[in-house]
Image (tube, rainbow, N blue to C red):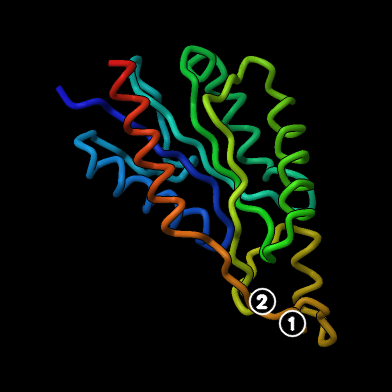
Amino acid sequence: MRTQVLIAYCTRSGSTAEVAEAIGKSVNGAGMSAQVKAIADVESIPTGTEVVLGTAIYIGHFPKEFHRFLTRFESELSNVRPWVFVLGPTEKERKQFAAAEEQARRELGKHPTLRPSDMRVLGGRFDPTHLNLPFPMNLIQMLPANPMRKLPASDIRDWDWIHRWAEAIAEEIATRV
């Protein structure tokens, strides 16, 4: 029987979903059965399922729906050591990555029963033409002088690194079985 791996993600503009899909492809390629799902579509986490969680960090915080997911599945997640990836900075500055990692650890710390095997902050993507911001921040998008329109688009996701990390996860899972 192939090891079941759930890759559950929370996304607003699709960037985190793309990373989750890439991780799923690598895990499947390692001979495991990976299911990639938006957290809203996860109905259960069967016993024995390995878990990878993904989200982005926005202004120092995870989305509320990600916290709700962690609370909803607190019991199941306390029985596994999930891997967590967080999309953060959209510029390759070490200081931004360090700040995002500190913020992500603080956010994960709100869930003391969650004990990740690993947590990684990855470079993110920013596209000012495809923002899906929550209220009240979405009101800014409607302003004619929206300051976000002046920001350049960027995508610093490192696909080779993401692939290698997913392979390392698959190797670690293989040693657990």
Q: Closer to the N terminus: mark 2 or mark 1?
A: 2
Q: Is residue 57 left or right of residue 139?
A: left
The image quadrant where one finds the C terminus is top left
How many neighbours does mark 2 have within 10 angstroms: few (below 14), some (14-19), or many (20 or more)? some
**Quarter of the figure with residue 131:** bottom right
Give SS at disc 1.
Answer: helix
Residue at point 75%, 44% (across, down): 61
Vertical placement of residue 75 versus 64, above or below:
above
**Quarter of the figure with residue 152:** bottom right
Please state the horizontal and vertical placement of residue 168, each as a whole percent of the image: 38, 36
The image quadrant where one finds the N terminus is top left
Residue at point 68%, 41% (across, down): 64
Please state the horizontal and vertical placement of residue 106, each as a whole percent of the image: 77, 32
Residue marked by disc 1: 149
Please state the horizontal and vertical placement of residue 140, each as a whole percent of the image: 81, 72
Task: Say the numbered circle drawn on residue 128.
Answer: 2
Q: Nearer the viewer, residue 168 or 147?
A: 168
**Quarter of the figure with residue 136:** bottom right
Please state the horizontal and vertical placement of residue 111, each as a whole percent of the image: 68, 22
